[in-house]
Image: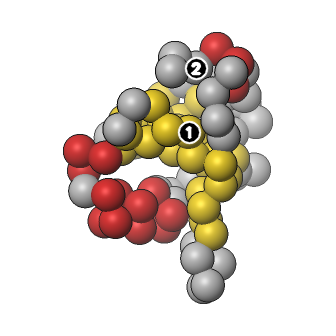
Amino acid sequence: SPNVYFYRDHYGVEVDFVIPVADRLKLIECKWSETPGIPKGFEQLQTLTGAHGIASKTVVVPTRGHRTLGDMSIEDPVDLTTLEH
């Protein structure tokens, strides 16, 4: 099974799940809102790693199915055990 981490800085900026895949990171954030904005944690980790360091950005919301917002995927609940690694 893949290693799963979280990210939080001293200001409370966070990403709920950070999953290393080779030399890149899959970022997953869970939100109650049906229309989430781009999480600050995604922006901060992309700044730290560079765009090439991020494999994917996913926000998990309670309902409504798959959709995209820019380069970010918005999903219903996700089974972490099915992620490729």
Q: Quadrant of residue 23?
A: top left
- The CA distance from mark 2 to mark 1 is 9 Å
Look at mark 2 in the image and give the residue it sits on.
Answer: 83
Vertical position of residue 70 compared to residue 46: above or below:
above
Please name whichever residue, 26 or 59, is drawn nearer the observer in this view of the structure.
26
Look at mark 1 in the image and give the residue it sits on.
Answer: 19
Crowd class of label 1 (few under 14; some 14 to 19; many from 20; radius 10 Å) = many
Please name whichever residue, 3 or 66, is drawn nearer the observer in this view of the structure.
3
Residue projecting furthest to the bottom: 11
Task: Find out whether the residues at labels 2 and 1 contact each other: C-beta distance under 8 Å.
Answer: yes
Vertical position of residue 23 compared to residue 30: above or below:
above
Q: Of marks 2 and 1, which one's residue comes earlier in the chain?
A: 1
Which residue shows up at 45% across the image and 31% down it? 21
- Counting the numbered discs, the total is 2
Name the amino acid, label 1: Ile
Which residue shows up at 60% across the image and 61% down it? 7
Which residue shows up at 65% across the image and 55% down it? 6
Please name whichever residue, 75 or 81, is drawn nearer the observer in this view of the structure.
81
Location of residue 61 in the rendering, given as x and y in whole percent from the top left corner? 69, 39
Location of residue 73 in the rendering, given as x and y in whole percent from the top left corner? 46, 34
Residue 55 visible (yes or no): yes
Name the amino acid, label 2: Leu
Crowd class of label 2 (few under 14; some 14 to 19; many from 20; radius 10 Å) = few
- In the image: residue 41, left or right of residue 63: left
Vertical position of residue 8 compared to residue 27: above or below:
below
Quarter that holds the N terminus: top right
Location of residue 67 in the rendering, given as x and y in whole percent from the top left corner? 48, 29
Please name whichever residue, 74 or 49, is drawn nearer the observer in this view of the structure.
49
Which residue shows up at 58% across the image and 76% down it? 9
